Image: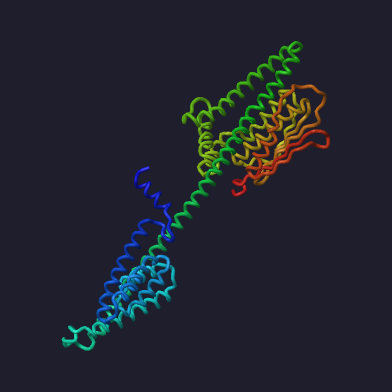
Amino acid sequence: MNATGAAATAERGFELWWWTRRRSVALDGGLALASAVECALRGVAFADRTGLPVWLVVVPGALAGLMLIVRRRWPLAVVLVSVAVLPANMGGMLALVGLYTLATTEAPRRIIGAVACMEGVGAIIVMFLLLDQDPGLREQSLPVWFRPLMSVLFGVACVVPPVLLGMYVRARRRLVESLRDRAHGLERELSLLAERAEERAEWARGEERRRIAREMHDVVAHRVSLMVVHAAALQAVAAKDPEKAARNAALIGDMGRQALTELRTMLGVLRAGESGSSGGEGSDAPSRLAEIVAVGASSAPARVRREQVEERGPSLTEVAVLVDQSRAAGMSVDLAVEGEPRGYAEQVESTAYRVVQEALTNVHKHAAGAAAEVRLAHREGEVAVLVQNEAPVGGGGARLPSGGNGLVGMRERVTALGGGFVSGPTDSGGFRVSAVIPDRRSARG
């Protein structure tokens, strides 16, 4: 710490009675000594004119002058003392400094005005008497108005400047305090805004992590589940039906390649956020998705990029492919479509596709061999999806692990678009997944 910083620290820690700075003590002490000397000198002149003992005038005058030491604590008392010693033509400095200090405080203006009038009237009277008793002025032929005018000017000069200066200083202090309070308020507001922004950023990062986890789960789990199912079927028929085993092996290879492609695309999302560049297959969508992860879901540009990413996603026209893949895996799936497609928003079609995909994956996992049905209903401003299966028969089929996040992910996707999602067992022992996804863009159109 330098010398200036150390002095500032010592100054802030200083406290003596009503003083908080050492230079204030020195200033008030110097003013009090100067006022005491001024009162003592004027007391000597007053004693010479009146014939009183010098000590009887000088000692009280000096004590009155020392009252300036308490001007910061009791400014009104200082001014009243100056008025009291005014008949002895003492206390000029006492009156000037006292009036200035009183005007800088928060004292009511009527009190300041009353005390200033007392001081001014007393100064006018004393000055008039001094001019009237001056032998030099008596010998001169002066106009009648000269002495009253000089007395009034002297009284105004003794009162008005210190009062006006004190009121100016008080107004300036108020302005500075107001600006300081406003600055502190702005600092508090900025601090709160920073905390809220950090909370929103943390929330956005969490949302992006959950969204990427949903994407990873949806695009990979379905195909891997089908691969496991086909592998189990291949193992069962390899010795009995080599031709069917070959078809199953070809299906496993195709699904594996598709799973690797989609997995490579999703991993490219995470790499693109670090490298700032992307390449290879599916590089455009991962780079855009990485921008969303970096920026956060709370900003408008991120929402625009999110929509651009979703435009690269699957659509309802690919639901038939999902059904065919499940049929190829040995599941009995019935697909029914009601109404005419209405050109929904890409997010709506992608979400509906993911619901069907995850529901069929769950059937493979938990109800192997059970028949299932898929219903799509195109309505005005919304699309409804229903996937339900019958009760599982026997204990055949492959055993597939489950993380328990499929239904949660579906619900999050649907509710994020303002839709409704219902899932649960049916009365016949099966399971049903139902979702209604609104398309606000189509409704506005």
The residue at 23%/87% (across/down) is 145
Q: How is the protein colored in the picture?
A: rainbow
| Quarter of the rendering containing residue 53 | bottom left
Residue 76: give x, y in percent of width and height.
Answer: 41, 72
The residue at 44%/73% (across/down) is 108
Residue 186 against residue 423 in the figure, above or below: below
- Is residue 386 in view from this perspective? yes
Tell me: 383 left or right of 139.
Answer: right
Residue 57 against residue 292 in the figure, above or below: below
- Is residue 164 in view from this perspective? no
Residue 136: give x, y in percent of width and height.
Answer: 17, 83
The residue at 67%/29% (across/down) is 322
Q: How many marks?
A: 0
Tell me: 376 left or right of 303.
Answer: right
In the image, farthest residue toward the left: 140
Relative to the observer, which residue lies in front, 244 or 104?
104
Residue 443 against residue 96 in the figure, above or below: above
Relative to the observer, which residue lies in front, 65 or 163?
65
Residue 123: give x, y in percent of width and height.
Answer: 31, 79
Check the picture and name the quadrant holding the N terminus. Answer: top left
| Quarter of the rendering containing residue 395 | top right
Tell me: 427 left or right of 255.
Answer: right
Relative to the observer, which residue lies in front, 29 or 378?
29
